[in-house]
Image (tube, coloured by chain):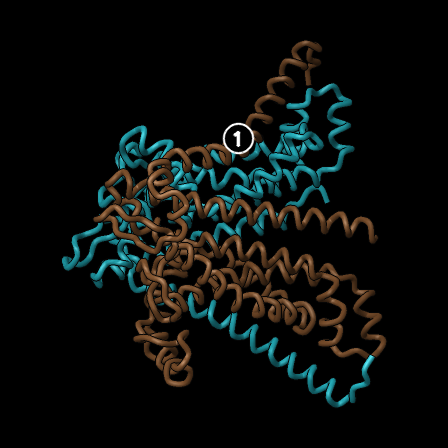
Chain colours: A brown, B cyan
Amino acid sequence: MPAASPSATSLGDRIFRWVTAISAALVLLIIGAIFVELVRHSSLSLHRFGLDFLTSTRWNPAKGEFGAASSIFGTLVSTAIALAIAVPLSLVIALFLVELAPPWISKVVGQAIELLAAIPSIIYGMWGLFVLAPVMSEYVQPALGRTLGSLPLFRGPPMGIGMGTAGLIIALMILPFITAVMRDVFRMVPDVVKESAYGMGATTWEVTRQVTVPYGIHGLAGAVFLGLGRAIGETMAVTFVIGNKHHISASLFSPGNSIASTLANEFTEASEPLYRSALVELGLVLFGITFLLQIGAHLWLRRLKKKMAVST
Amino acid sequence: MKRRSTGRRRLLNSAVTATAMGAALLGIGALTWILYTVISRGAAAINWAFFTELPTPPGVGGGGLSSALWGTVYITGVAAALGIPLGLLAGVYLAELGRHSRLGDAVRFGSNVLMGVPSIIVGLFVYTIIVLPTGHFSGWAGGVSLAIIMLPVVARTSEDMLRMVPDSLRESALALGAPRWRATFGVIFRAARAGLITGVVLAVARVSGETAPLLFTALNSPYTVSSLNEPTANLTVTIFNYAMSPYQDWQTLAWGASLIITVAVLVLTLLSRLAFKENRTWS
């Protein structure tokens, strides 16, 4: 390596520092720009509808009426269904992988799960539309209607697609993801702690419930947060099966929509400035929700780290 | 603590074990079902014409998705050409130069936030900054939106990988009189090579299956890709359009495209794992 003169060195390094710093700052710049652009392009709708936008259920592009309530409702409900299914299921699968399964099964299944987390969401959507929806309409929904039809949740014609099916697909999508994180959390519990419980004669379930879960509770909550973040902005898997109707219903069988599915379906067709502006405002709402979620999750994890640092 | 009989505790334990196994089977079964469907229906659509011909109008039969295949390759290429260098440089800043700086902390936090932003929002953003000003949808815009999704992923993984390189290596390079940039690219990058490649390949795998950010940027097109300055055919939006269409032969093509995307993503993911396992030079 030829010896560089001091001035050349510092010039090269100064450029180096600047180039890397600018690349890094680009991340922040993009976040800021997303916010500014979304606000700028939704100003028409922001001025016209104000806060009513969030609460109105009317969505009539022909009349120039736009309200986000049904999209927001659908986003929250489909996410809630997905989490209600995926979280307990991933918890027991992670438990199975770490505590119960023989090592070779745990390894194979663990790797399979990580691969499945990589499958694009549009594949889940395809499968949902062509395989799951027919199964739902022929077997699952009629059976639910017969047995639990008195509840408003399970009323209506079994069309296969709808809010329930959308929630189920999102659940399948985030399942491998949450399972992988929870498995890592369970693995971080020191063996010594578990072994001392086993040594006292505790069964596997007792060790899990009273030692492993409390020990990793914050990490588990982090996993749920991550899953929530994925579920709430999920677009393609949902758009295929949610039914795409601006409609609020208590029934899981009825078609609905979510913010992301509305955008995916209508944005390229929207030619009116107000229509487009309303759709951008929907995007702004989704951006706002995910942004707050991320900050919440991050602060939570930071507090957790501090706590751990004190206790160890 | 309440005393409980050993029998009941054992029974409860067995019940939980059975439930856990059942849940594992259920989850894995559902996911296997998805893969099986994609493979069996997709394989039926794959033939020579699928890779070489353009799509035909519904009802005509035959035809392929050559334009969409190439379009996806080009758009992903643009994304990689922008996202990988910028991501690596940002990673260098986070790991080497600005490790404890205020900007470094902010960028680390910002990267997490950006990774959590739904990809359709990124598509919407690129629509406002590129499609609207230029007046048309384009493959470039599609590439930019995928690059934005790649940037924080590459930045964070490369930061982690660079940090695994021991400080003694940095110090020896600098002690030889190498400037910082030379020490970074010549020594530290070489030591972290396997990890960096893994991170980059994973990021490419992730964006190559993205659909939502392309809906408002690259759009789609039935024609051969002659320029990225116009709406550009791509596999994922084609899957969306064709699957939603009422035509049987289009739906078949959509299954074929799904198989290609799935296989590509899984192969890339597996490859990146292998790269990481085989030559981890620093350990």
Say which of A249 and A8 sits in front.
A249
Side of B210 relative to A293 (left or right): left
Say which of B14 and B193 sits in front.
B14
Q: Position of residue A296 (x, y in %)?
A: 61, 48
Q: Position of residue A226 (x, y in %)?
A: 57, 54
Is residue A180 visible to the viewer in this orientation of the structure? yes
Q: Is residue B269 above or below residue A36?
A: below
Q: How many marks can you see? A: 1
Q: Quadrant of residue A151?
A: bottom left
Side of B281 relative to A52 (left or right): right
* Chain of the residue that carries numbered disc 1 in the rendered image: A
Q: Position of residue A10 (x, y in %)?
A: 67, 14
Secondary structure beneath dot 1 equals helix
Is residue B80 visible to the viewer in this orientation of the structure? no
Q: Quadrant where the N terminus of chain A lies?
A: top right
Residue under label 1, please give it.
Answer: A26
The residue shown at (27%, 50%) is B65
Side of B191 relative to A152 (left or right): right
Give, as a three-letter code, the residue at label 1: Leu
The residue shown at (30%, 60%) is A245
The residue shown at (41%, 68%) is A164
Q: Position of residue A17 (x, y in %)?
A: 63, 22
